[in-house]
């Protein structure tokens, strides 16, 4: 019987999650904006620093 060993070498998911949490806290986003920020958090940060 063969064993399958899966190893994850990337921390990109942790970086993305940390960025999302930072965005919600830094910009004081509401609940629904925070949910939208799951996908668009770079947009929210860019909008903050642009204007």
Image (spheres, helix red, strand yellow):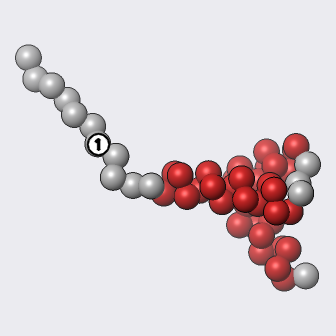
User: Residue at (59%, 56%) from the top-left corner?
Assistant: 16
In this view, which residue lies farthest toward the left?
1
Picture quadrant of residue 50? bottom right
Can residue 40 be seen in this snapshot?
no
Q: Position of residue 17 (x, y in %)?
A: 62, 51
The answer to whether residue 19 is left or right of residue 24 is left
Q: Position of residue 25 (x, y in %)?
A: 81, 56
Q: Position of residue 34 (x, y in %)?
A: 81, 49
Picture quadrant of residue 6? top left
Q: Position of residue 37 (x, y in %)?
A: 76, 53
In this view, which residue lies farthest toward the top?
1
Can residue 34 be seen in this snapshot?
yes
The answer to whether residue 7 is left or right of residue 4 is right
User: Residue at (63%, 55%) from the top-left corner?
Assistant: 18
Q: Which residue is mark 1?
A: 7
User: Residue at (10%, 23%) from the top-left corner?
Assistant: 2
Picture quadrant of residue 11? bottom left
User: Residue at (66%, 60%) from the top-left corner?
Assistant: 19
Instruction: Identify the image quadrant of the N terminus.
Output: top left
Where 2 falls versus 34 (above or below)? above
Where 6 falls versus 27 (above or below)? above
């Amino acid at each position: 019987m063969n064993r399958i060993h899966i190893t994850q070498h990337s921390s990109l998911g942790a970086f993305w999650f940390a960025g999302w949490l930072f965005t919600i806290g830094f910009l004081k986003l509401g609940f629904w904006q925070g949910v939208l920020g799951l996908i668009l958090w770079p947009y929210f940060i860019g909008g903050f620093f642009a204007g």
